[in-house]
Image (spheres, rainbow, N blue to C red):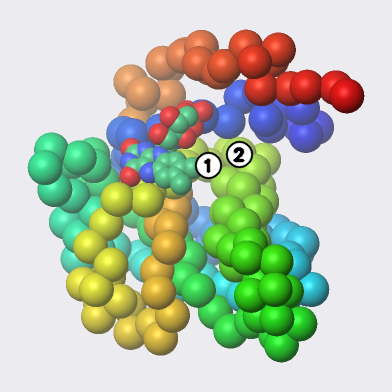
């Protein structure tokens, strides 16, 4: 798949086959892609924690609440993307320019991870709704968890589902000056 195809066909999947394990090499490929993501001052301010098996089962309810994310029960693999250490220049730049580079960096790494997942034939969904402190306790991570990526193979019925991408019209978000 070339990048355009990945961007075109990648979509959030919210129905996973809990019985189908995800090959370790595929998870590693996703992490390797995320590791190559660019970051402000090459600070690489991230930590990726892979949760499988019992940990994934314990993590799922921490992403749920108020009727949100009830689908995570059957997710076989989660990758928690947490804040990691920043180098001095990125920290200084962030303060001087009042721009949250770390959040931007984490988002880019997440995009790389999910794009590689698509390339590997895996489905994914980025999760931003979770109980931060409880997630932190579960995974034993120093940095603040910011995003969780669900990875796995879709249930057959959701695999067959084709959904048009809903996006704002190009002319409402792109301006040439
Ligand atoms: C930062 C972020 C947080 C998100 N949080 C959730 C979430 O908690 N639960 C969920 O089901 N989807 C979540 N999503 C997925 C978005 O709803 C989805 O990407 C968007 O609707 C576009 O659909 P698509 O990914 O299928 O193209 C999140 C996406 C991003 C980028």
Say left or right for 19 vs 92. left
Q: Look at the image and tell me in which quarter the N terminus lies.
A: top right
Ligand 1 visible in quadrant: top left
Query: Are the residues tagged 2 and 1 within 8 Å (C-beta)?
Result: yes
State the image coordinates of residue 35 (x, y, percent, origin top left).
Answer: 69, 67
Q: Residue furthest left?
A: 66
Residue 110 falls in image quadrant: bottom right
Vertical placement of residue 84 versus 119, above or below: below
Q: Ligand 1: does it lie within 8 Å of the C-beta at label 1?
A: no
Q: Report the quarter where the C terminus lies.
A: top right
The picture quadrant where one finds residue 131 is bottom left
Work out which residue is located at the far right of the displayed protein and give it: 177
Q: Is residue 65 left or right of residue 44?
A: left
Question: Marks 2 and 1, Cα distance to the nearest angstrom?
Answer: 5 Å
Q: Secondary structure at mark 2?
A: helix
Q: Which residue is drawn at the image coordinates 63% and 62% (left, top)?
A: 99
Name the residue: 33% across, 20% down: 157
**Secondary structure beneath disc 1?**
loop
Image height of 82 relative to 71, above or below: below
Which of 175 and 160 lies nearest the eye of the viewer? 175
Is disc 1 surrounded by few (<14), some (14 to 19) or many (20+) residues within 10 Å? many
Can you give x and y, in whole percent of width and height, for residue 3 in the image? 78, 34
Observer-nearest of 160 and 91: 91
Q: Which mark is residue 122?
A: 1
Tell me if I can see residue 35 in this picture.
no
Q: Is mark 2 within 8 Å of ligand 1?
A: no
Residue at left offset 30%, top offset 76%: 136
For the residue pair 44 and 50, the one nearer the viewer reads as 44
Q: Which mark is residue 118?
A: 2
Residue 41 pos. (x, y %): 79, 73
Q: Residues within 10 Å of mark 2 (few under 14, many from 20)?
A: many
């Amino acid at each position: 798949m070339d990048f355009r195809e990945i961007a075109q066909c990648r979509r959030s999947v919210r129905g996973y086959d809990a019985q189908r394990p995800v090959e370790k090499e595929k998870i590693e490929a996703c992490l390797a892609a995320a590791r190559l993501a660019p970051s402000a001052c090459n600070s690489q301010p991230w930590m990726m924690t892979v949760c499988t098996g019992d940990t994934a089962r314990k993590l799922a309810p921490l992403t749920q609440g108020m009727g949100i994310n009830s689908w995570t029960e059957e997710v076989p693999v989660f990758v928690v993307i947490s804040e990691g250490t920043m180098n001095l220049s990125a920290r200084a730049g962030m303060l001087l320019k009042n721009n949250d580079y770390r959040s931007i960096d984490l988002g880019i790494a997440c995009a790389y991870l999910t794009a590689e997942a698509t390339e590997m034939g895996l489905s994914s969904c980025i999760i931003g709704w979770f109980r931060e402190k409880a997630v932190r306790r579960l995974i034993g991570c120093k940095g603040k968890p910011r995003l969780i990526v669900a990875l796995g193979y879709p249930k057959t019925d959701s695999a067959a589902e084709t959904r048009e991408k809903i996006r704002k019209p190009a002319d409402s978000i792109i301006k040439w000056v």
